[in-house]
Each structure stands twice: as C-alpha cells, then as structure tokens.
Image (spheres, rainbow, N blue to C red):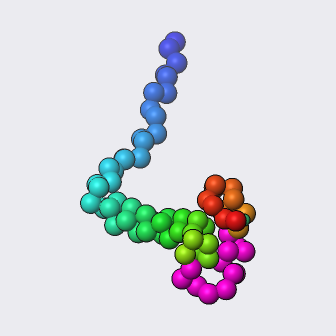
Amino acid sequence: MAHPIATATPAAPAITPISVKAILPWAVFFGILLMALIYFVGAEQGATSLISGEDVHEWVHDGRHLLGFPCH
Ligand SMILES: [Zn+2]
C-alpha cells in the first residue's frame, strides 16, 4: 500500500520588483541626510562653522578622529 506523499508546499509570497522611479526620491532624501551628517561630523566647527560655539564639535569629536577627518 502506497503512502501518499505530501508534495504541496506553501506558496511563496509574490515578489514585486521596486522600480527605480519609486526608489529615487528616497535615495535622494537619504543621500542629502548622509551628506549633512558627514558635513557635521567632518567639518562643522572645525574647517567651517555655521553654528557658533563648540557644542557640535564636542558631540562629534570622537567620530571625527575615528573617520580620519583633520581636527586639531
Ligand atoms: Zn580632535
């Protein structure tokens, strides 16, 4: 007597490709955020200064050294 073999597998969820047109605004948005972060870590209150004082420098000082930006 043959035993029935369960061959049914659960259906894989359909994968919908994401178009470049849908990703582009998010890529631009996060690219701008990343560039602002790199600016504040690498240059603000060092090479340039948009904000007076030294608070930004103190907050990002270790990151600046870690990433190799010139500091002092
Ligand atoms: Zn330093």
Task: Choose top left, top right, bottom left or bottom right for residue 52.
Answer: bottom right
In front here: 51 or 16?
51
Instruction: State whether residue 17 is above or below residue 4.
Output: below
Q: Which of the image's four quarters has the C terminus?
A: bottom right
- In the image, taking residue 39 as reference, residue 62 lies left or right, namely right
Q: Residue at x 72, y 63 (%)?
A: 62
Q: Residue furthest bottom?
A: 52
Q: Position of residue 1 (x, y in %)?
A: 52, 12
Instruction: State whether residue 54 is above or below residue 32.
Output: below
- In the image, taking residue 49 as reference, residue 20 lies left or right, namely left
For the magenta stretch, what is the residue range? 49-60
Q: Residue at x 63, y 61 (%)?
A: 70
In front here: 57 or 9?
57
In front here: 45 or 19?
45
Q: Residue at x 32, y 50 (%)?
A: 17
Task: Choose top left, top right, bottom left or bottom right for residue 43.
Answer: bottom right
Query: Is 59 a magenta residue?
Result: yes
Residue 37 seen from this side? no
Q: Position of residue 9 (x, y in %)?
A: 46, 34
Q: Quadrant of ligand 1?
A: bottom right
Q: Position of residue 60 (x, y in %)?
A: 68, 69
